[in-house]
Image (cartoon, helix red, strand yellow):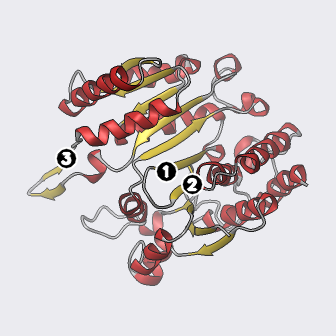
């Protein structure tokens, strides 16, 4: 009986988490969900973003299902302050989750919800593979005497394992994104990716793009991309940019993989505190993250496909939450998905 560590988190997190759990139980009734505080909720109750007891229980689980953390209540620029996002960084580091997978696949029913013209988003099917445990977010940092610094460091091993994750996911082409015209870390990145490609994946086409050029091409010609591999900060920015191809951040799932223990699954969207408690949040990003949990975390491919198909069909019948231009509530959207599974 698989055990899932559920981290509802903050804002709309508990609402979309409850919706996704209901959907997952509809296709895999034997799943057990154990809930733990994380983010702001944990800071309020325990003074830390993630307790040691919660972390140990999470490590012993089969998969981790996270909704959202953060909000203005805990925002501060004070150096060394406990922030909700520390829970994410701690989980990634402690679980060794170095590869973040973000599929970008606009659904036909939502082509017209994208800010881009239909002809640009039609047929887009890309995967962004972002390095998750290195780079600026994990380097030495500090502020003193009117000066602040953040250190960007990558090792050959970190680049190699991320490159392999990207090439393994690709059918025909990988685009490696860097800033090799400026940064030494990017020059190392490009050299290592080129070597791994030549030695292990010569059957896959490889191209290199500078991050600014890639950002422009994501908007002007998104169908060009199949798999993008890139470092932590660039991946963070580009994946949020690419998410708008679907019409809403509320639609996108993500998986963080790579460690020997459980993998982590979460929607791309944040905690949206402005609509928390109103019952109008879009649960589809969390539900589709649940599908990724079934596929990548538990090896339940047919169940994952059933959830994804149910989401497609519900949207095809015109059910829309407010972020997609409709009036459906969280409960309405969840019910529509469940009806397609019955």
| Direction from residue 41 to residue 186 in the image, left or right | left
Compare marks 1 and 2 and give the one earlier in the sequence: 1
In the rendered image, which residue does mark 3 sit on? 151
Label 1 vs label 3: CA separation?
23 Å
- Judged from the image, the secondary structure of the residue bearing numbered disc 2 is strand
| Direction from residue 175 to residue 20 in the image, left or right | right
Label 3 vs label 2: CA separation?
27 Å
Q: Tell me if mark 3 has few (under 14), some (14-19) or many (20+) residues whose alpha carbon lies within 10 angstroms of its own.
A: few
Where in the figure is residue 169, as x and y percent of width and height? 52, 33
* Above/below status of 80 relative to 198: below
Compare marks 1 and 3 and give the one earlier in the sequence: 3
* Above/below status of 317 relative to 115: below
Where in the figure is residue 314, as x and y percent of width and height? 84, 44
Q: Residue furthest front?
A: 199
Q: What residue is shown at x 53% (from left), y 19% (from top)? A: 172
- Judged from the image, the secondary structure of the residue bearing numbered disc 1 is strand
Look at the image and tell me whether residue 237 can be seen. no
In the rendered image, which residue does mark 2 sit on? 266
Where in the figure is residue 16, as x and y percent of width and height? 68, 61
Q: Which mark is residue 226?
A: none
| Direction from residue 43 to residue 187 in the image, left or right | left
Q: What residue is shown at x 88% (from left), y 49% (from top)? A: 340
- Judged from the image, the secondary structure of the residue bearing numbered disc 3 is loop
């Amino acid at each position: 009986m698989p055990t899932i560590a559920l981290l509802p988190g903050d804002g709309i997190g508990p609402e979309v988490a409850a919706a996704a759990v209901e959907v997952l139980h509809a296709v895999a009734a034997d799943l057990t969900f154990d809930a733990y505080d994380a983010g702001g909720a944990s800071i309020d109750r325990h003074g830390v973003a993630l307790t040691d007891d919660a972390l140990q229980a999470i490590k012993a689980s089969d998969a981790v299902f996270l909704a959202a953390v953060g909000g203005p209540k805990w925002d501060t620029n004070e150096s060394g302050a406990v922030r909700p996002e520390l829970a994410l960084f701690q989980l990634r580091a402690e679980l060794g989750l170095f590869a973040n997978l973000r599929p970008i696949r606009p659904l036909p029913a939502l082509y017209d919800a994208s800010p881009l013209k239909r002809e640009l988003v039609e047929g887009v099917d890309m995967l962004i593979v972002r390095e998750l445990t290195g780079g600026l977010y994990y380097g030495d940092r500090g502020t003193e005497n009117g000066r602040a610094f953040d250190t960007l460091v990558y090792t050959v091993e970190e680049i190699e394992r991320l490159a392999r994750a990207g090439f393994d996911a690709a059918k025909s082409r990988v685009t490696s994104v860097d800033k090799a015209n400026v940064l030494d870390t990017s020059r190392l990145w490009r050299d290592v990716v080129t070597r791994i490609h030549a030695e292990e994946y010569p059957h896959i086409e490889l191209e290199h793009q500078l991050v600014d050029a890639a950002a422009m091409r994501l908007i002007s010609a998104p169908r060009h991309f199949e798999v993008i591999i890139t470092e932590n900060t660039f991946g963070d920015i580009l994946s949020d940019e690419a998410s708008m191809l679907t019409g809403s951040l509320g639609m996108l799932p993500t998986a963080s993989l790579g460690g020997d223990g459980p993998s982590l699954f979460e929607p791309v969207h944040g905690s949206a505190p402005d609509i928390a408690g109103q019952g109008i949040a879009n649960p589809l990003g969390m539900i589709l993250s649940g599908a990724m949990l079934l596929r990548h975390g538990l090896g339940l491919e047919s169940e994952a496909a059933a959830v994804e198909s149910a989401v497609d069909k519900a949207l095809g019948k015109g059910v829309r939450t407010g972020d997609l231009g409709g009036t459906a509530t969280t409960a309405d959207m969840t019910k529509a998905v469940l009806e397609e599974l019955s």
